[in-house]
Image (cartoon, rainbow, N blue to C red):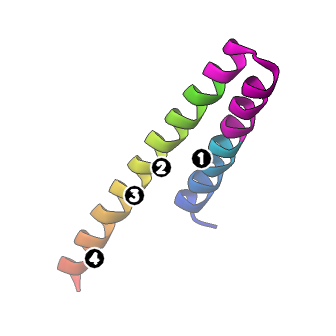
Amino acid sequence: MDVSFTDKAKNKADELTGAAKERIGDATNNERLRAEGTAQQTDARARQAGEHVKDAGRDVRDAFTK
């Protein structure tokens, strides 16, 4: 299995966990949990963007080596 795939899966799981925390924080009026969930989602999305950049770089490299 590709490391990139594993990283993408972990990032998606982290994003979903953050969304759940945010929703639970909303439902229970827990500002700390809501903020933690938002931060976790933002962090996961930033890592996903990094993975997309790495993929694009590989695609460019592969285009020039063929």
Range of residues picked out in magenta? 17-35
Q: Quadrant of the N terminus?
A: bottom right
Badge nearest the viewer, 4 or 2? 2
Say what amino acid the circle numbered 4 marks. Answer: Asp
Above or below 20: residue 53: below
The tag earlier along the polypeptide, 1 or 4, is 1
Residue annotated with mark 1: 11
Give the main secondary structure, helix, strand or loop, of the magenta stretch: helix
**Residue at the image position 73 percent from the left and 34 percent from the top:** 23
Mark 4 Cα within 10 Å, few/some/many (few <14, many 20+)?
few
Residue annotated with mark 4: 62
x%, y% of residue 24?
Answer: 79, 29
Indicate whether residue 36 is drawn in magenta: no
**Label 4 element class:** helix
Indicate whether residue 19 is drawn in magenta: yes
- As measured in the structure, the alpha-carbon distance from the residue carrying label 1 to the one carrying label 4 is 25 Å
The tag earlier along the polypeptide, 4 or 2, is 2
- As measured in the structure, the alpha-carbon distance from the residue carrying label 1 to the one carrying label 3 is 12 Å
